[in-house]
């Protein structure tokens, strides 16, 4: 099955459902403007109670050193996702705060946007391609925006990558097929409302990928 990252988890039930469904990653957003924001110590409490093979991901946006230190101290995440305009140098500096490595998120709206991946190829441990946010947005992700996923077939990078942006149970199979993704990230597509995850939608999303394989 395609690896799944359930992102923006905010409750113990969210994390337990991710574990039950066999997701690879549980994503916790540490960014106050987001409706999915959670404090690192709360994320740590929920994650410790989960069973299974989940890997934790702390999602940050242009995080300063103090926040990275707090995340490392409270959660000791397997991965840190940098979802802002961080540079390759900042990716390297952040790696010491994560057990496994850094996921660098990059926005995509058109083919030219993929050129940004070259600077992070071999620098980040994984790259996440998300939809470019709407004009004037106060956060870089979690909007449910879609793009032409087939653009990712043009990628020429060695770094493993994840597909994100507007995925739902209804479109994820087709999105994986046209993009060639080995892993997917979903947040708004498994919610009743921003920040409010639905166990049924999480299961439907997983079922869609299971049927694919």
Image (tube, rainbow, N blue to C red):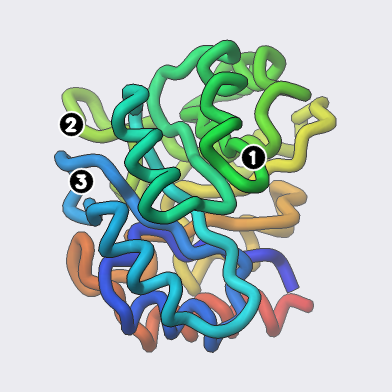
- The quarter holding residue 1 reads bottom right
Residue occupying the point 33% across, 62% down:
43
> Residue 101 got which mark?
1
Q: CA distance from mark 3 to mark 1?
A: 23 Å
Viewer-nearest of labels 2 and 1?
A: 1
Q: Is residue 210 left or right of residue 194?
A: right
Q: Is residue 63 left or right of residue 182?
A: left
Q: Secondary structure at mark 1?
A: strand
Mark 2: give few (<14), some (14-19) or many (20+) Cα within 10 Å. Answer: few
Picture coordinates of residue 61, whole percent (x, y): 34, 31
Q: Looking at the rendering, in which quadrant would you find the C terminus?
A: bottom right
Q: Residue furthest front?
A: 73
Residue occupying the point 58% across, 52% down:
78
Query: Which of the marked residues, 3 or 1, is nearer the chain's N terminus?
Result: 3
Per the image, the residue denoted by label 3 is: 34
Q: Is residue 70 left or right of residue 154?
A: left
Picture coordinates of residue 146, whole percent (x, y): 43, 46
Mark 1: give few (<14), some (14-19) or many (20+) Cα within 10 Å. Answer: many
Q: Is residue 103 left or right of residue 46?
A: right
Viewer-nearest of labels 3 and 1?
A: 1
Task: Name above or below for residue 181 compared with residue 192.
Answer: above
Picture coordinates of residue 166, whole percent (x, y): 42, 53
Query: Which of the marked residues, 2 or 1, is nearer the chain's N terminus?
Result: 1
> Residue 189 got which mark?
none
Per the image, the residue denoted by label 2 is: 138
- The quarter holding residue 25 reads bottom right
Residue occupying the point 39% across, 80% down:
201
Q: CA distance from mark 2 to mark 1?
A: 26 Å
Task: Name above or below for residue 94 compared with residue 36.
Answer: above
């Amino acid at each position: 099955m395609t690896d799944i990252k359930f992102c923006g988890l905010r409750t113990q039930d969210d994390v337990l459902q991710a574990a039950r469904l066999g997701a690879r990653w549980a994503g916790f957003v540490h960014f106050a403007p987001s409706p999915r924001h959670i404090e690192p110590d709360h994320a740590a409490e929920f994650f410790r109670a989960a069973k299974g093979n989940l890997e934790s991901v702390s999602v940050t946006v242009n995080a300063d050193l103090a926040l990275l230190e707090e995340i490392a101290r409270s959660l000791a995440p397997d991965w840190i996702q940098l979802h802002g305009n961080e540079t390759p140098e900042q990716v390297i500096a952040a790696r010491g705060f994560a057990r496994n490595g850094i996921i660098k998120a990059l926005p995509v709206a058109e083919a030219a946007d993929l050129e940004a991946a070259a600077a992070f190829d071999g620098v980040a441990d994984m790259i996440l391609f998300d939809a470019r946010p709407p004009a004037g947005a106060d956060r870089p992700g979690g909007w449910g925006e879609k793009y032409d996923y087939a653009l990712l077939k043009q990628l020429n990078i060695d770094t493993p990558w994840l597909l994100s942006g507007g995925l739902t149970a209804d479109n994820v199979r087709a999105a994986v097929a046209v993009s060639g993704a080995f892993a997917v990230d979903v947040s708004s597509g498994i919610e009743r409302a921003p920040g409010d995850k639905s166990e049924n939608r999480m299961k439907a999303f997983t079922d869609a990928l299971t049927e694919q394989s």
